[in-house]
Amino acid sequence: MSIEPREWVVYEPPKSVSFGHQSRIRDPRLAWPTVERFMADLTQHTLGSHIELTCHGPSLRTGSEVASARLQEARRCFGPEIGDRAIHRTHPRWRICESQLTLAIQFALNDDRFPKQEVGPTRFHFAYNFRWREFDVCRDVSDDPRNSVSLLGVTIGQQRLFLQPNFVYPASYDSEFVKDFIDRTELIVPFRFRDQYFKRWLPPRSPATKFGRYLRLEPTWRRGSVN
């Protein structure tokens, strides 16, 4: 493969897997600290603005007693749900502020105090925006039209932790630094990489767009040097 100037590497699971992966550790109570460690050790991050908790109402896939218990507890912890008259909004929701994040995480993890449901009863979703600590040191990308900010979406509920990564590595795939960094930090990442979801991100050819093009990488691209 020929290397174009200023191309980057991205990791982004496709829609067919809901853009993400279940946590490496299946028990969400044990998995959540691995997310915290990942964010603290490798990233400079901020919390995204969209933070939402949902309690699923009773249905064929969510038992009425469990749904009722979770709803009452949510109201006690977070107050009244969002007033929403939209027809398609059938499940109570709360907008969570940053100061409530830890409480909401614990609330969602407490799904394990109830029998496992086919859906819900809780869904808590938020995201982190971040840059890799080491990449901020090694390369200035401020003049590039592409966004070098990575994202990690987090969904807790139904006794699982689901992660939606969009990781941007601002270096080309032949860079020993980027290959070493990914290999060295792989076990800190709280989910298992799938090599087929790494891509090359080429810069835009026209100033009219800032997205550029994605190209497939060979599954073995980070196994040894590229000649």
Image: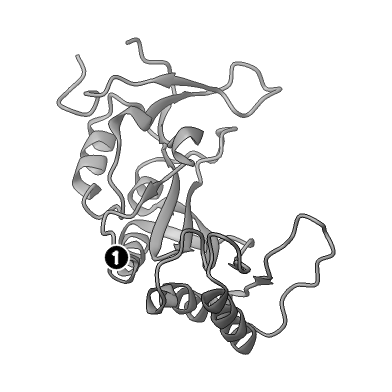
User: For residue 47, what is the image quadrant?
Assistant: bottom right
Residue appearing at x 33%, y 55% in the figure:
23
Q: Hey, which residue is sitting farthest left in the picture?
A: 224
Q: Where does residue 203 sit, x and y in percent of width and height?
A: 52, 23
Write the residue at 43% across / 59% down.
Answer: 44
Residue 99 appears in the figure: no
Expressed as whole percent of the image width and height from the top left, the position of residue 24 reads 27, 54
Q: Is residue 32 visible?
A: yes
Tell which residue pokes out farthest to the front in this image: 60
Q: Residue furthest top?
A: 2
- Image location of residue 114, percent across then percent down: 41, 77
Query: With respect to residue 110, does 41 lie above or below?
Result: above
Figure quadrant of the N terminus = top left
- Residue 170 falls in image quadrant: top left
Q: Amino acid at mark 1?
A: Asp
In this figure, which residue is indicated by the disc labeled 1? Answer: 27
Tell which of 130 and 91 is nearer to you. 91
Left or right: 20 in relation to 147: left
Residue at (44%, 19%) from the top-left corner?
215
Identify the residue at image location x=72%, y=82%: 80
- At mark 1, the secondary structure is loop
Q: Is residue 151 above or below residue 99?
A: above
Q: Residues within 10 Å of mark 1 (few under 14, many from 20)?
A: some
Q: Is residue 31 above or below residue 99?
A: above
Tell me how many marks there are.
Answer: 1
Q: Which quadrant of the view contains residue 93?
A: bottom right
